[in-house]
Amino acid sequence: MTDWTLYLVTDPDLAGGPDNVPHIVSQAISGGVSVVQLRDKRATRGEIRQHAQALCEVTGNIPLFINDYVDIAAELGLHAHIGQSDTRYVEARKLLPDHLMLGLSIETHEQLITVIADAQEAGVRLPDVIGIGPVRATSTKPDHAAPLGVEGVAAIARTAVCYGIATVAIGGVDKQCASKLQAVDGACVVSAIMAAQDPHAAARELRGAFVQVPRVLSIAGTDPTGGAGAQADVKSITAAGGYGMNVVTALVAQNTHGVRSVHTPPLEFLDEQLDAVFSDVAVDAIKIGMLATVDTIATVQAWLDMYPSPVVVLDPVMIATSGDRLIDADAEQALRQLARRVDVITPNIPELAVLVGEQPASTFAEAVEQARHFNRGTATTVIVKGGHLTGTEVENAVVEPDGNITVVRAPRVETMNTHGTGCSLSSALATRIAAGDTVAEALQWSIKWLHEAIAHGVELRVGQPGGHGPVDHGYRARQVL
């Protein structure tokens, strides 16, 4: 399935020259762009071919479309997009192999009805996606048709969906406009990213504005008592404003007193679960929890490569709150490698020590230094969690690869209800980042919410005395009942 959520059309003039385009596109993809179209009205055919090849180096598995030049797209094995004044749709569709997508600009409802009729008469596939617009007047295309407005776009989109055609809205789309475009599959932008000072941040904010409810996938083990793992993840995602989904990596027989046994289903079943999600749902963020074996880690990594997500948060589950080891010894090195490829990791103090091959930190400053040691030379942000340390206040920190550190504090709660706090924090964090928050903003929200959940966990009366009970994921939501 193609994720149309945030579609970027390139503009070499806004980029300061064609040589700057690949870097901007790379930054935008890291911020959440899910589809890219190469558009350069002044380039020669040879230059279009060169620019497309350069973009292929940074887009990876992100779909790349070439505007206008259908034959070059077919030659390079890329998708194509055409406008109303370009090659006729039926002819263009016949030029492209069946496995390549063809998009079409649509300015009026009549144009959509016409192309549907023409395609059906010719016996060719309907457009895979239509760019509906302009939504508003835009300077990036001075000769554009009359603006449709949000309602005009929605009216065309309603017809398109009846024929299974994906839709994106284009023309004057910015963060404020994107939040109103809920009738289409995605927002298509040019200047909002190509002219942005920080393309990564611009893409993250645009995607967050368009996606009203982030679709967050948890890849984790289970907890039959509901306090940790996949069960806690869905509760936390919901509490943070997202829609939670689960792929189960391990069936864990555990309760508030500890882990009894772990059953790892066949890898074929893990593949089937992941395929079921990615073939049907556009995923805005992924939270990864328990990956018990080397093969499980490799399988998940392969799917991450095939379906890049705007946000990947790894909770490197190795040691439970109870002290139980939850991962094969052989998997530790594989997990270290995965941790260096994701966006954010949320280890507890013992897990951070394992990742850097040192003794557990005894102070917050030592933990921050271990985090800086880990993410040096990577693009991974480390969340330092001070829950295992002592003191009346719990210190947590966002340690970014550039050395920037943001500390978030919360009063320590004296309680036994701490089961699943790591799962809950990482899931809430992933959801808030997918909603458009910076990592620091997401951590601030998540810590405040989790503090409330921990403080009221004992009121759930789940578990026998002496165990680590769950937190109350739904405490805040129940205050409005």
Image (cartoon, grey):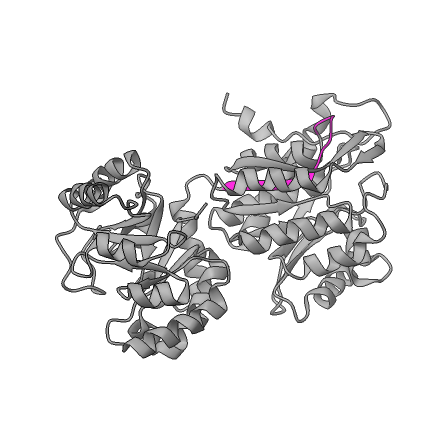
Taking the image as shown, residue 120 lies to the left or right of residue 24, namely left
Residues 120 and 46: in front is 120
Residue 127 in view (yes/no): yes
Magenta residues, start to end: 215-226
Q: Where is residue 19 in the image (x, y as percent from the top left)?
A: 39, 79
Query: Does residue 264 appear left or right of residue 184 in this picture?
Result: right
Against 404, is 300 above or below?
A: above
Residue 334 figure quarter: bottom right
| Closer to the camera in the image, 12 or 448 | 12
Can you say whether 6 is above or below 452 in the image? below
Say which of 180 and 4 sits in front.
Answer: 4
In which image quadrant can residue 196 be found?
bottom left
Asked whether 58 or 469 is in front, the reply is 58
At a point 18% along the width and 45% down the height, the residue shown is 118
Residue 369 percent location from the top left of the image:
75, 65
The quadrant holding residue 68 is bottom left
In the displayed structure, 242 sits above or below 178; it is above
